[in-house]
Image: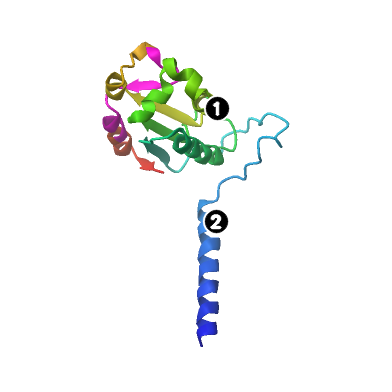
Amino acid sequence: MLGRSLLLLLLAIGVFWLAASRLVRGPEVAPASVVVAPPERIAPSGPPAYNLLADIRVGTVDELQLLFDRVEHLLDRPLSEGEQPLVSLVLHGSEVEFFALRNYDKYKDVVDRAAKLAALGAVDISICRTQMETYGIQPDQVPGFLRQVPYGPGEVERLRNNGYVSM
């Protein structure tokens, strides 16, 4: 009896896992060393069903890199000029320091990766001026690809009110 119950439980878990993977499956991403040609531009298949929002308050570069991994997993091609970014990121914690130009040498990898994702159209990145002031960062002391907003939590709320959903 226990063996049968265990078998049914494993079967149920397998079915659930398969269904869940089909619901959240994104494009398969090859390791960077395998990619030998730049991605093709493909005509958009239509607007996304929803916009994603990442309310960023991370403490480490590794946590931010993990988020970028998730965004890259969603990106199957560069987006054209008229398309919405896949994810709108709002930086409003200690991570604003990663993007201060004075810290570029220390955080070059994460800043360059963010710039690449922004250039591909995958992300729209907002940075909180209030937090910038807290860390002594002036508006002209962050990269130009960041969209500066007065107050990060207010920007998160604005995006939510405009139909964005948290990822």
Element carrying mark 1: loop
N-terminal-most mark, 1 or 2 = 2
Q: Considering the image in quadrants, where does the C terminus appear? A: top left
Magenta region, residue range: 141-156
The residue carrying pointer 1 sits among few (fewer than 14), some (14 to 19) or many (20 or more) residues within 10 Å by Cα, namely: some
Residue 126: x %, y % from top left:
38, 26
Quarter of the rendering containing residue 157: top left
Residue 35: x %, y % from top left:
70, 34
The residue carrying pointer 2 sits among few (fewer than 14), some (14 to 19) or many (20 or more) residues within 10 Å by Cα, namely: few
Determine the residue positioned at 40% across, 19% down. Answer: 100
Determine the residue positioned at 55% across, 56% down. Answer: 22
Is 147 magenta? The answer is yes
Spatial CA span between label 1 and label 2: 26 Å
Element carrying mark 2: helix
Q: Residue furthest top?
A: 140
Residue 78: x %, y % from top left:
58, 30
Q: Amino acid at mark 2?
A: Arg
Could you say which disc has been placed on residue 120 in the image?
1
Contact flag, marks 1 and 2 (Cβ < 8 Å): no
Asked if 11 appears above or below 69 in the picture, the reply is below
Please state which of residues 1 and 123 is positioned toward the viewer in this rendering.
1
Q: How many marks?
A: 2
Please state which of residues 72 and 141 is positioned toward the viewer in this rendering.
141
Residue 141: x %, y % from top left:
39, 13
Give the residue number, with chain letter if any, for mark 2. 22
